Amino acid sequence: MTKNIFILLLLISFKIKAQTKVYTVDNEELITETELDKRLDKMQKLMNRTSKKTKFVNPTILDSTITNDTITYYVKFFVEEKKKNLAIKEQALASYINKKLLQFELENLNGKKVTLEDFNDKPTFINFWFINCPPCIKELPLLQSLQKEYKNDFNFIAITFDSKEKVLRFLEHREFDFNHLINAKNYIDELGISMYPVSIYLDKQGIVRYSDESYKIGNPKDLEIIKNKIINKLSSLN
């Protein structure tokens, strides 16, 4: 009996060691761990050149599948304040789901102070981002498309710790027609957000119903699919 168990464990161990690990970033082509490291290094160098503050590009596993002897890891790069090794994702703002979002009084680009109550007329989509965040910038076409098509049905808010001057310069070259709330570092820290980008969905009472950590946009078809998923979530809050 003991001998049979030993043989079984040996076979399982061999099976695990024999499995090939591959990775896909944003549902693009399959790559090896070495290629993943090279891509990560490239993005970190870009971040170092474009951001004055120290930020780290961290790879995070969103999902995984096993087919025969191959494990495929679906990876997303997030910009965070601390360096992390490859890890399984944690749900953003999980403690706020089905609870009222923390109150805020933040400045918009016109210098006006706005509060959460100013957006209680309809469901609200809030995106947390900053101007030197490559993953944030990558999803801007999706967000802009959403705002342009559904601006009369839902509130679209973008919250950042960046200053008014930096955001205005950024918007000179890119379309991002959300309600921009700026200089929000203290508020973002209170929420415990350290991973960017992240988006949350509020109902008309300011209750957080859903949260998303970045969007996996590998090709134009993905954009339409993800956009429909976002709108379905917002529509369910009416």
Image (spheres, helix red, strand yellow):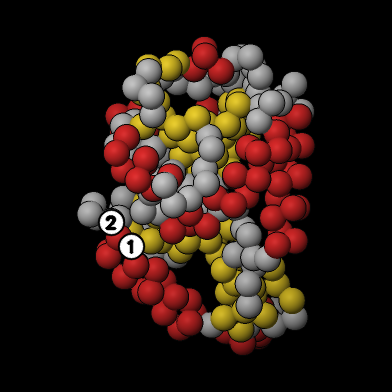
Q: Nearer the viewer, residue 14 or 150?
A: 150
Residue 74 appears left or right of 105: right
Secondary structure, mark 1, is helix
Residue 47: which disc? 1
Q: Is residue 19 above or below residue 206?
A: below
- The answer for how far apart the CA atoms under marks 1 and 2 are is 6 Å
Give the residue at x 48% y 35%. 158
How many numbered discs?
A: 2
Give the residue at x 57% y 81%. 31
Q: Nearer the viewer, residue 57 or 97?
A: 57
Q: Is residue 112 something one can see in this rendering?
A: yes
Give the residue at x 37% y 18%. 112
Q: Is residue 225 above or below residue 235?
A: below
Give the residue at x 58% y 74%. 23
Per the image, the residue denoted by label 2 is 51
x and y percent of residue 170 in the render? 39, 48
Residue 95 appears left or right of 151: left
Residue 13: which disc? none
Whether label 1 touches label 2, CB < 8 Å: yes
Q: Nearer the viewer, residue 101 or 153?
A: 153
Q: Is residue 192 something one can see in this rendering?
A: no
**Kind of residue at disc 1:** Met
Label 1 crowding class (10 Å Cα cut-off): few <14, some 14-19, many 20+?
many
x and y percent of residue 102 in the render? 45, 21
